[in-house]
């Protein structure tokens, strides 16, 4: 650590606003990565069941077709929310950049009250709900497969 750098504050000392922003960025990025992996894995697993041509997987797919379809649809909706969150974040930043260029300013506040800005949180929260639901549904289906095998 450079001599002029201050060490990060300990939890007992509290956190600065910048500490909180850094933590939020780190945590939300990590959550998004995990949720995206869960969503893609769920869709791939469902696709594997649908395309199975023999054995237990084919039997499960024929018996639980609707369950698998709904699970895949939930995961796809979660992935769509992930994409929409990224698209909206781009729009918000690009709109702010254009506004700053038009006004010729070096600093401007984000439009926290705008529907577009707030929709980022909606899409993040929605994917954080949908992806685990889809994954839990697959785990429940696996449990049913094992119990009936």
Image (cartoon, rainbow, N blue to C red):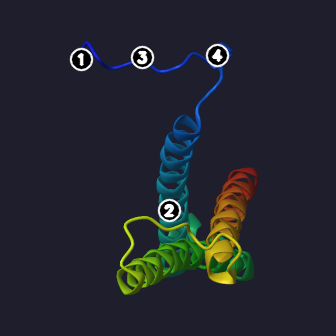
Secondary structure found at label 1: loop
Secondary structure found at label 3: loop
Looking at the image, residue 104 sits to the left or right of residue 54; the answer is left
Circle 1 residue: 2
| Classed neighbour count for the residue bearing mark 2: other residues with Cα under 10 Å, few (<14), some (14–19), many (≥20) | many
Secondary structure found at label 4: helix
Q: Which of marks 1 and 2 is nearer the N terminus?
A: 1
x 50%, y 73%: residue: 89
Cα distance in 3D space between marks 3 and 2: 33 Å
Cα distance in 3D space between marks 1 and 3: 10 Å
Q: Which of marks 3 and 4 is nearer the N terminus?
A: 3
Cα distance in 3D space between marks 1 and 2: 37 Å
Instruction: Please tell me whether mark 2 or mark 4 is closer to you in this view.
Output: 4
Asked whether the beta carbons under mark 2 and mark 4 sit within 8 Å of each other, the answer is: no
Cα distance in 3D space between marks 2 and 4: 35 Å
Query: On residue 56, which mark appears?
Result: none
**x then y, percent, for residue 124:** 63, 65
Looking at the image, residue 46 sits to the left or right of residue 13; the answer is left
Circle 2 residue: 36
Cα distance in 3D space between marks 3 and 4: 12 Å
Circle 4 residue: 13
Q: Which of marks 3 and 2 is nearer the N terminus?
A: 3
Instruction: Please tell me whether mark 1 or mark 2 is closer to you in this view.
Output: 1
Circle 3 residue: 7
């Amino acid at each position: 650590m450079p001599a002029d750098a201050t060490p990060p504050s300990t939890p007992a000392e509290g956190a600065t606003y910048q500490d909180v922003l850094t933590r939020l960025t780190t945590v939300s990025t990590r959550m998004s990565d995990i949720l995206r992996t869960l969503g893609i894995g769920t869709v791939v697993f469902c696709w594997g069941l649908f395309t199975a041509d023999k054995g237990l997987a084919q039997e499960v797919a024929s018996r639980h077709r609707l369950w698998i379809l709904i699970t895949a649809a939930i995961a796809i909706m979660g992935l769509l929310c992930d994409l929409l969150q990224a698209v909206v974040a781009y729009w918000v930043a690009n709109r702010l950049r254009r506004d700053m260029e038009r006004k010729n300013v070096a600093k401007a506040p984000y439009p926290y009250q705008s529907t577009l800005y707030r929709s980022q949180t909606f899409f993040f929260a929605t994917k954080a709900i949908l992806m685990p639901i889809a994954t839990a549904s697959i785990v429940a289906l696996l449990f049913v497969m094992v119990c009936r095998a």
